[in-house]
Image (tube, rainbow, N blue to C red):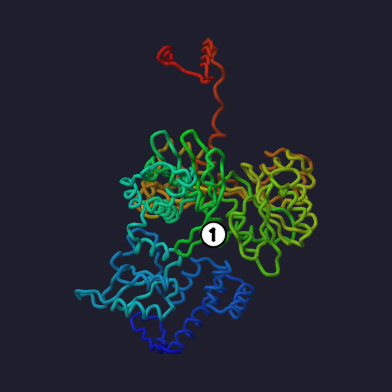
Amino acid sequence: MPGCVMLVLEVRASMKPNTGQAAPTTATAVVRKRQETHFKIGELLLKKGALRPDQLDHALKIQKSMGGLIGGVLLELGLISDADLAATLAELMDLELIDLNHLGVVDPEAAHAVPETVARRHTLVGVRFGRSNPGQEHPDQIVVAMADPSDYMALDGVRATTNLEPLPAVATRAQIQDALVTAYLESPRSLEEALGELKDFKIETAPMSKDMDDASRLRNEAGLAPVVRFVNSMLFEAARMKASDIHLEPQEHSVRCRFRIDGELRVVAPPPLHLQAAIVSRIKIVSGLDIAEHRLPQDGRLKIRMTGRNIDVRVSTMPTVFGEKVVLRLLDQSATKLRMDDLGFEPEVVTSMRRIITSPHGIVLLCGPTGCGKSTTLYSFIKELNQPNVNIVTVEDPVEYRVEGVNQTHVKPSIGLTFGHCLRTILRQDPDIVMIGEIRDLDTLETAVRASLTGHLVFSTLHTNTAVSSITRMVNVGLPAYLISATLLAALSQRLVRRVCGACGKPTELRPAARQSLQRFLRQPVDFPVMQAPGCEQCGFSGYRGRLAVYELFEPDDSIRDMINHGAPESEIEARARQCGMKDLVDNAWIKLQAGLTTVEEVLSLGFHKAQEPPAPAATGLPVEPPEAEPAPEANGTTLLDFDANPPK
């Protein structure tokens, strides 16, 4: 190939001396060495029990036909997580495993010492400088966090461009990509800069020509550079902060902008009020909505790609008294790569769930309110079972995440394509596994039961507070009890609580009165320090970073099935399940609190302590004051409460 030069690579101090690895001397040797290293990854994962032999064989077959490294193939198939791969590489090559999420780990000067093109091409980031001789004045080494430390050509590129000896360390690919965003972020891409540009920006309102209607004017304003940059920066900042929703809310004298992060809404710097219409129009344009329609709600979607992450954005607009409110929901497609081990479940529960979801037939239900992580858990089941020899079909409203190899259907009730209609069609499509986004009515429930009775495995969700109450809900909908006992394999109820920030969280002792109150709620002794979250810059001064699941797994045995058949009350079924070893939501919250993963405030936010509070006191016998006279409406139908004329008593 013209212009191609065979590189002779040397790796001197780039590997630790105790690794015993010889430096490859040719490009061919480099490739061979990387393949040998990654082949050992599979062997090590087998020894650790993180991978089954059949899974490794399947990955090796795909690698043989498609090429690539076995570590990357295992990761792409979802058989291992990014963290599994990083930890295995660090152990295999005897290298440092770096958590880049900790504040101050990455030295900005070290990061900028590596050219951005080299860092992004090889997925690495400079972490800190080093000195081969402690007494020397200037550093001659640089520690580099890498997704693949066996990439000798990447190390050679760092050596050539920095004139420093690279010392490889290992970090997850996602952490490196996030670190690269921070390290090489240009100021115009920040939300603060975009807002600063908008403050002095005015839209000059010219007289509307005969050929220009309101939609054309809005389209012109939405295309102005500062407006475009603000919308892009807002999306970029929300994705960087891992927000799940963006709220743009017009008020009477301002616009409020909020990000939902870890389940909590946080106010961020808002745009000027006079640009609200232009910003909403810009969002409508990129999400395919009608910019001239302001009176009716609209739904659309767009996609963004950021640091290798594909993010679907669902857009919803709604008219309010001060203008259109816009909510953008960010759906990170990387959530479909999560395995059950990554969701915060205890190992014994993961083992039980893997046994349950590999059953040949039956129904598995996920219970809980909206936003409790049911969809993420369902997709982890699908990821676990998604194999070429399995036909998986889903019915969803809407399809939030797209999964390769899975047949997904979006219901459209407006044209008669309901859950029940889709399910009846799916049963003629030779499915092995059926996932129903939500069971809402008897028709859907009966079809799901019929599918499980005819040899299909069915996953679905129900909006119930506990796992056992799913039985009551199905009976109330109209399903006979004998069908519930015959088909229900398990019900998993879950909630999400915020995880304590690892940088600022610290243990503290509870006061005796607070400890006694907490013990009454948790039904367990709280004889350990609990975590406190004061907040720091790394967690946005919230005290929390990320969320984890609190759950209960209800798996009926023969005795419980007999109780269901005979119509036993929910309380008796729950008591029997606890006798059989079921840990409910409160028990699991206690485990998370004892492990120092969350705080007392988050445990109490589950709300179950309210059910245990004493009832309201009975009537005191005091005289009851007569009700106030209702204010009369004005002529236009609007009620006026005139506190100047009639002050409150």
- The crowd level at tag 1 (other Cα within 10 Å; few <14, some 14-19, many 20+) is some
Question: Relative to 3, is 101 above or below?
Answer: above
Where residue 453 sits, quadrant-wise, is: bottom right
Element on which disc 1 rests: helix
Residue 329 visible from this viewpoint: yes
Residue 279 horizontal/vertical position (percent): 43, 47
Residue 600 seen by the camera: no
Measured from the top left, where is residue 434 in percent x and y? 71, 57
Front-lying residue, 354 or 547: 547
User: 469 or 459, which lies in front?
Assistant: 459
Q: Mark 1 points at which residue?
A: 333
Residue 149, quarter of picture: bottom left
x and y percentages locating residue 556 in the rendered image: 71, 50
**Residue at the (72%, 58%) spot, across then down:** 457
Query: Of the residues shown, which amino acid type is indicated by label 1?
Result: Gln
Q: Determine the residue positioned at 56% across, 79% down.
A: 67
Image-based side of 353 in relation to 120, left or right: right
In the drawing, does residue 107 fall left or right of residue 353?
Answer: left
Residue under the point 55% across and 69% down:
76
Image location (x, y in percent) of residue 402: 60, 60
